[in-house]
Amino acid sequence: MRKFAFFWLMVLVLLTAVSVDAQKNRTRKRPARKTRVQDKRVYLVHADVLHFDQYKNPDATILNGKVHFTHVGARLYCDSAYFYEASNSFEAFGHVKMYQGDTLSLFSDYAYYDGNEQIARARYNVILKNRKTTLYTDSLDFDRLYDNAYFFEGGKMVDGNTTLTSDWGEYNTKSKMSVFNYDVKMKSPKFYLTTDTLYYDNARSMAHIVGSSNITSGKSHIYSEQGYYDTKNEQARLMERSVLNNEGRRLVGDSVYYDSKLGVSQAFRNVVYVDSVNKNKLTGNYGEYYENTGFALCTDSAVAIDYSQGDSLFMHADTFKVVTFNIETDSVYRKLYAFHKVRAYRRDVQAVCDSLVYNSKDSCMTMYRDPIVWNNNQQLLGDEIQVFLKDSVIDRAHVIGNAFSIQQLRSDTACYNQVSSKEMFAYFIDGNIHEAQAVDQVIIGYYFEEGDSVPIIYNYQETTELKMFLKDRKLQSVWTPKTSGTMYPLNQIPANKKFLTGFAWYDEVRPRDRYDIFVWRPKK
């Protein structure tokens, strides 16, 4: 009995020792599992015929008929191949096809595939397809590690309705970004672009042009050396003095925005808008133009320049606006609005007013709010002044309300010929005045001269109408109905007669040159 008890005691001790050892082993730190290394070997899946040629190509396994390889998720097919198992590569011949996932495929007549570098060099009738984008070329290297495709002997990419061609380029199948170089051409149903360097985002249909570039869209032509063109929405954002031309009209700016669908263009900083048809232009720091409506606007140091008469007329205002009426008909006409603080300069004529409207329908330019016009030593003012043009040459003028004409005899004297009335009219031939009329409540203050334009007598008259006829800018004759007045020696002119009511000589307001139009000087 003792032996039996002793036996079971020994068994219990042994079991306890084993249990403790097992517990110690379980608490020891287990070694980390080995990371599975990606298999980069090229595998031959199938070939109808397999053989070797120790004389012609001893390093290759020669495969024929429905050849099929796989490599790191890619499937490759061809009619025949040389399989270099030692270098993990192969050459493929005839109907070469490579598929990567369900979105990318590559076709060619020949290809060399390096499994270690994961590069496919496809040649002859190469077609790369990636979703809706297709690239055609004769020589293409596709780097599967970086998803880059390179072509270098001419290529054509078709992205929806857009086609791009160039001598050299690259395309990233993951980011959908492309680069095209040398003789780049981009075509769509709506535009045609030529340049030397183009970056294209296939996902956004956005082209980034670099270098000398030309874009033609309908009747519009764009020249730019830096900018972006959204081919889907037909919108351009251009920099570095880009130029937009449209049927004889040109818009230039440090930066230009153009929407071909809406026919809207905007220009920023150092803007120049030229209408070569009508021989005028606008400059400023902001401008916009709407092709469909004919609306144009220019502001911020805005200047309108008319060069139809050889000697240019420069006009400044806070803002210029052009509105076109009946644009799609034969009775089209335009109105130019200038506001505020209008100042104009030409060598033979200067003018100021608060605002101005020119209507091409009747070729009438109307000046509002304190208009003043100078011609040589003459000054004309009134509540409103209308100037009518014929073939861009002044034909007649009409001063409405408080009309006042002043002629300074000499700059070193205080002698002025004056005419005031309710209204005045002036008529021109070939731009030269030949008749002037003053109507209603006419008052005349006029100096008779002799010798070297020396005034000797002052004539003050009141009448209902005055007509003056001129030739070569010289007075030939004067007509008036019944008048009342007095002739005064120079030393006996009454103060209230020497200067008519409302007289003011605004020489300090007058623009001195084309640059002085920017300096607004109000009447004193």
Image (cartoon, rainbow, N blue to C red):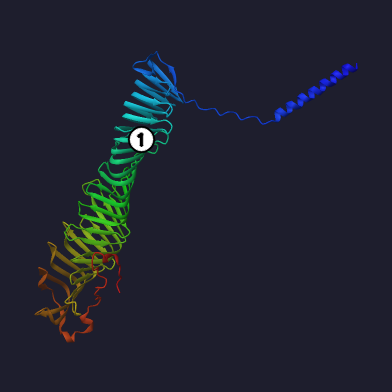
Horizontal arrangement in the rendering, residue 313 relative to residue 59 (left or right): left
Quadrant in the rendering for residue 315: bottom left
In front of the other: 415 or 59: 59
Q: In the image, what residue occupies the spot 13% across and 74% down?
A: 481
Where's the N terminus, which quadrant? top right
Q: Residue furthest front?
A: 55
In front of the other: 202 or 362: 202
The answer to whether residue 167 is visible is: yes
Q: In the image, what residue occupies the spot 24% across and 50% down?
A: 249
In front of the other: 78 or 164: 78
Residue linked to disc 1: 170
Q: Amino acid at mark 1?
A: Glu
Q: Residue 87 at what x, y percent from top left? A: 42, 24
Q: Residue furthest bottom?
A: 492
SS category of the residue bearing label 1: strand
Q: Residue 49 at what x, y percent from top left? A: 39, 13
Horizontal arrangement in the rendering, residue 484 relative to residue 147 (left or right): left
Quadrant in the rendering for residue 131: top left
**Image mark count:** 1
The answer to whether residue 166 is visible is: no
- Above or below 33: residue 404: below
Q: Residues within 10 Å of mark 1 (few under 14, many from 20)?
A: many
Q: In the image, what residue occupies the spot 28% across and 58% down?
A: 337
- Above or below 127: residue 192: below
Where's the C terminus, which quadrant? bottom left
Q: Residue 414 at what x, y percent from top left? A: 20, 80
Q: In the image, what residue occupies the spot 13% across and 65% down?
A: 432
Q: Residue 75 at what x, y percent from top left? A: 43, 23
Q: Residue furthest right?
A: 1
- Above or below 130: residue 182: below
